[in-house]
Image (cartoon, rainbow, N blue to C red):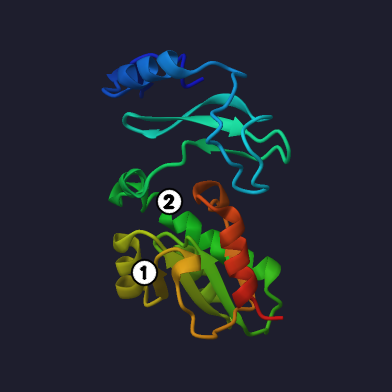
Amino acid sequence: DIHRAGPLARRNGEEIRRDNRPIRDKMISDRFDPGSAVSPEFTCGVCRASGESAKTVCPVTLGRETVYDLVECGECLTRQLFPLPTDEELGDFYNTGYYGFDWYKHRGWGRTFANWYLPRGSQGTLLDVGCSLGYFLDGVRSVSGWEVVGTEFSSTAVEHANRELGIEVLKGGLADLDFEGRKFDFIRISNVLEHVRDPVELLSACRKIIRE
């Protein structure tokens, strides 16, 4: 559990110190009370219920000194961070170091995805929301006749996909982008809904651009 972890970690049998762990431990112990009442300012991002029936589940962190409560809505049982991270905190989390791990695996997953879900010999346009560096899309493209497009918040990731892979990736949130009437045959959202502030807005934006 994150609130029980100490300041030392072990790597290759050697103890290493996590400089920010003691700070987070203290912040968590000072504020966390399992099952405690939730602030009346809480509003569920899915059903819009208030915090009257909500409860705290556990503490979570986006790294460094940011600690949030994971709150479960009493009506729809959706869990979300509270308070929601600011743009600055999200920007700090999705920094350059967040991307680039296991890129070859993402390319392989893209190939597997195309073979499983895109009919052989078919054509269409696939949109990957939150596509990171674009290697998943690169994998899809390599084994199918589908056109691929992505969206991503990180300027670094967008630049890499556009320049290094030649993949069209647009910067920004889906609801804020103007596709000028463009429609997509398949929209992929993987490991994204739990990161956005308004999942209903995101899904509504998808509904507008998915081909009937």
Q: Quadrant of residue 13?
A: top left
Callout 2 amino acid: Asp
* Picture quadrant of residue 77: top right
Q: Is residue 168 left or right of residue 47?
A: left
Which residue corresponds to the image point at 42% horizontal and 19% vertical from the top-left? 28
Q: Is residue 15 above or below residue 106?
A: above
Please, what is the three-letter code of the amino acid marked with disc 1?
Ala
Looking at the image, tell me whether mark 2 or mark 1 is earlier in sequence order.
2
Q: Residue at x 37, y 77 (%)?
A: 166
Q: Position of residue 198 (x, y in %)?
A: 54, 53
Element type where label 2 sits in the image = loop
Name the image quarter holding the C terminus. Answer: bottom right
Q: Name the residue: 26% across, 22% down.
A: 19
Is any atom of residue 112 visible in this view?
no
Q: Residues within 10 Å of mark 1 (few under 14, many from 20)?
A: many
- Across and down, in percent, residue 115 comes to 66, 69
Q: Residues within 10 Å of mark 2 (few under 14, many from 20)?
A: few
Distance from the alpha carbon under mark 2 to that under mark 1: 15 Å
Q: Secondary structure at mark 1?
A: helix
Check whether the beta carbons of the residues at disc 2 and disc 1 lie within 8 A of each other: no
Given residues 94 and 179, the one toward you in this image is 179
Check residue 102 in the rendering and tell me which mark sits there, or answer none: 2
Q: Vertically, is 2 above or below 51?
A: above
* Relative to 72, residue 9 above or below: above
Q: Which residue is mark 1?
A: 161
Residue furthest front in the image? 40
Residue 75 visible in the snapshot: yes
Tag nearer the camera, 2 or 1: 1
